Amino acid sequence: MEGLILFIGVIGNIISVLMFLAPVGTFWRIVKHRSTEDFESLPYVCTFLNSFLWTYYGIIRPNGGFLVATVNGFGVVVEIIYLILFLVYAPAKMRAKTAILIGTLDVGFLAAAILATWLALQGETRIAALGIICAGLNIMMYGSPLVAMKTVITTKSVEYMPFFLSFFFFLNGGVWTLYAWLIRDVFLGVIIPIPLFF
């Protein structure tokens, strides 16, 4: 059983890495055109916050958390690069909006969540509280492609919703649901399937 859990977790990590790298084409386009055009920063702000908290969750969770922490740690690094590129090439109004989102969610909320769970809670209670926060944030993260869908509808073009990002979100949800079931982690299992419905 341990071998199966490791195998599914490694497959989940590979798919998650592909999901994190799916927007590379978008950012190549942003750098090439030196403009963020009609792209929104919210999905990347939310993904950074989500990845950072799942990394923390994976570190404090005793069994099965290592694979969750490693892939989300990779995601944190990738999202930092995306956010820096977005801030460099965004027009002034979008740059200000993005900076406010980063300050509010990626600094303020993140610091509050980590401090509250670290200082006020211990053991299984800390893990459960952080799991609830992470699960709730997954709703926001998996809802953030709706911003891209709005752009697709208003521009009548699918160029703002990359196929591979949607595809890897779908695969990611399925594999991590199976992993959560195998390691009996309700927080991974309750919310991760959301992309299966997009």
Image (spheres, grey):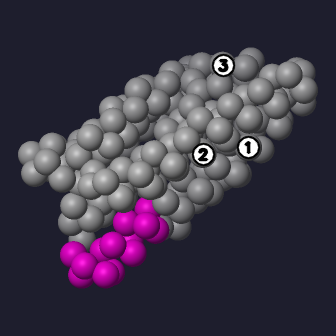
Disc 2 is placed on an element classified as: helix
Q: Which mark is residue 104?
A: 2
Q: Which mark is residue 133?
A: 1
Q: Position of residue 125 (x, y in %)?
A: 90, 30
Dot 2 or dot 3, earlier in sequence: 3
Q: Is residue 42 left or right of residue 67?
A: left
Q: Position of residue 98 (x, y in %)?
A: 43, 50
Disc 1 is placed on an element classified as: helix
Q: Which mark is residue 59?
A: 3
Q: CA distance from mark 2 to mark 1?
A: 16 Å
Instruction: Tell me whether circle 2 and circle 1 mark residues in contact (CB < 8 Å).
Output: no
- Tally the numbered discs: 3
Dot 3 or dot 1, earlier in sequence: 3
The question of residue 110 being in magenta is answered with: no
Nearest to the eye among marks 3 and 1: give it.
1
Q: Which region of the structure is painted magenta?
A: 145-157
Q: Position of residue 139 (x, y in %)?
A: 62, 57
